Image (cartoon, rainbow, N blue to C red):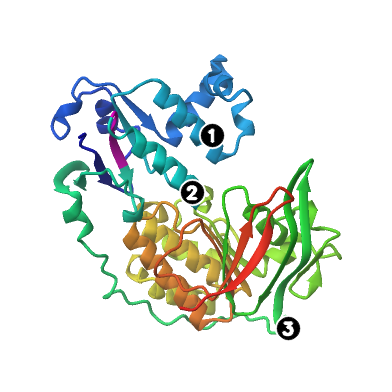
């Protein structure tokens, strides 16, 4: 039976020297059986390189395999195509770079079954962040210390370790300095919303009501229309006009601007970090949420300064308030951006895949903060994710269920 390894990491570089030497069969220190063997990397990096080759050098590897332009495929379909291509090259081993990230349950199951069917013929090295993602064929787990691989342990020893969040304290959420009490109890109301793009039916007769202070989770498979539904609320999706959609007591398309709507919404997605290229401190990042700006460009008042301080205390980063945002860990960046989204105490907070890329412990910490916001404020929360976070405590779920006529919505109440 093959040995199969897993490496727990949030920051190992697929382009780094260690992974690249391993792919060339040059790392005999921990993986002696792979010396001089041929390896392949299953990663978004590999996908990007192949797509670049198609458009810069007309080497149409993936498009030929797909029988259509690879860019017309969804991200999930592109990764399936990449996997089939890698397997066709008969590698001795495959490095799996967080292979289940952003896949829905059905896609995870399908890929998992394919991998297990190959496990007797190909050695796997799985880069992972979540215990739940570990392949059942994994035999050993490797830890990282000081940017080098070390401490090989059996899978049973690794799985016996528990996540410790018992000593984590999140301070009480501060009161808002700006509050809008003129809004109605119902913040979002959708009545039989249907959306099509050309011949493709995306949503069919979706009904959804979100009230002040409610905590919702929006779930559904890849391609079920979650992004489309969010864009009807937060974005300027023209498909929203002419439909029975009411936002903050006003029918969509009756004269309000996109900015008037966004002013009432706190929004977070991990890709927001790409916007902040300036060398802003944590304090500047948080207080900039009062102005919806990318960075801080205005002089703040005493109350605004105090509010930013209080939020940094909530997330346990007040002592690091003058540290550069780019010099802190990934989970701390997420906490800062969440505080930035909440500093105005918006009526609605949209969290789009907030735990993507985090390991189990950091995802648990983020969930604890979100639960605290839900419990101690009047802000309604819409949490979008493929993954069920064990510590998260939503009270309601809207599940989009795919059909050929477009996804329908099923509303569930949750008993925590």
Mark 2 vs mark 3, foreground winner is: 2
For the point 34% across and 59% down, the residue is 360
Q: Is residue 156 visible?
A: yes
Q: Nearer the viewer, residue 135 or 294?
A: 135
Q: Is residue 151 left or right of residue 288?
A: left
Instruction: Rate crowding at label 1 as few (under 14), some (14 to 19) or many (20 or more) other CA atoms within 10 Å.
Output: some
Give the numbered dot on residue 11. none
Q: Is residue 273 visible?
A: no
Which residue position is annotated with label 2? Answer: 102
* Residue stretch rendered in magenta on the structure: 121-126
Which residue position is annotated with label 1? Answer: 78
Location of residue 144 in the rendering, given as x and y in whole percent from the top left corner: 21, 46
Distance between the alpha carbons at the discs numbered 1 and 3: 47 Å
Distance between the alpha carbons at the discs numbered 2 and 3: 38 Å
Residue 298, quarter of the rendered image: bottom right
Q: Is residue 123 magenta?
A: yes
Residue 293, quarter of the rendered image: bottom right
Mark 1 vs mark 3, foreground winner is: 1
For the point 27% across and 43% down, the residue is 137
Which residue position is annotated with label 3? Answer: 182
- Secondary structure beneath dot 3 equals loop
Chief secondary structure of the magenta portion: strand
Location of residue 62 in the rendering, given as x and y in whole percent from the top left corner: 53, 23
Distance between the alpha carbons at the discs numbered 2 and 1: 13 Å
């Amino acid at each position: 039976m093959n040995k199969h390894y897993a490496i727990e990491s949030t920051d190992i570089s697929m382009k780094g020297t260690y992974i690249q030497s391993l792919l060339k069969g040059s790392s005999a220190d921990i993986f002696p059986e792979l010396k001089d063997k041929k390896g392949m990397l299953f990663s978004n990096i590999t996908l990007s390189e192949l797509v670049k080759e198609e458009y810069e050098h007309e080497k149409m590897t993936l498009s030929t395999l797909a029988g259509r332009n690879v860019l017309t495929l969804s991200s999930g379909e592109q990764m399936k195509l990449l996997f089939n291509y890698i397997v066709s090259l008969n590698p001795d081993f495959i490095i799996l770079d967080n292979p289940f990230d952003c896949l829905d349950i059905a896609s995870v199951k399908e890929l998992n079954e394919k991998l297990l069917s190959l496990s007797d013929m190909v050695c796997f090295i799985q880069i992972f962040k979540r215990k739940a993602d570990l392949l059942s064929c994994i035999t050993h787990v490797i830890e990282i210390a000081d940017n080098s691989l070390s401490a090989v342990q059996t899978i049973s020893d690794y799985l016996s370790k528990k996540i410790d969040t018992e000593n984590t304290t999140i301070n009480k959420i501060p009161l808002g300095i700006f509050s809008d009490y003129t809004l109605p109890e119902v913040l979002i109301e959708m009545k039989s919303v249907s959306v099509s793009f050309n011949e493709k039916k995306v949503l069919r007769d979706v009904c959804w009501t979100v009230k002040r202070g409610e905590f919702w989770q929006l779930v559904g498979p890849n391609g079920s229309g979650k992004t489309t539904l969010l864009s009807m609320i937060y974005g300027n999706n023209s498909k929203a006009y002419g439909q029975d959609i009411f936002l903050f007591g006003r029918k969509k398309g009756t004269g309000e601007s996109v900015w008037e709507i966004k002013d009432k919404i706190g929004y977070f997605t991990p890709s927001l970090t790409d916007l902040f290229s300036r060398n802003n401190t944590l304090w500047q990042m948080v207080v900039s949420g009062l102005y919806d700006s990318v960075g801080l460009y205005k002089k703040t008042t005493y109350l605004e300064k105090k509010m930013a301080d209080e939020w940094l205390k909530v997330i346990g980063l007040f002592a690091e308030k003058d540290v550069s945002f780019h010099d802190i860990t990934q989970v701390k960046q997420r906490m800062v951006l969440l505080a930035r989204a909440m500093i105005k105490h918006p009526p609605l907070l949209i969290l789009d895949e907030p735990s993507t890329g985090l390991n189990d412990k950091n995802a648990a910490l983020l969930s604890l903060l979100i639960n605290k916001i839900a419990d101690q404020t009047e802000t309604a929360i819409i949490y979008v994710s493929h993954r069920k976070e064990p510590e998260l405590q939503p009270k309601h779920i809207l599940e989009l269920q795919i059909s050929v006529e477009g996804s329908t919505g099923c509303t569930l109440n949750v008993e925590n």
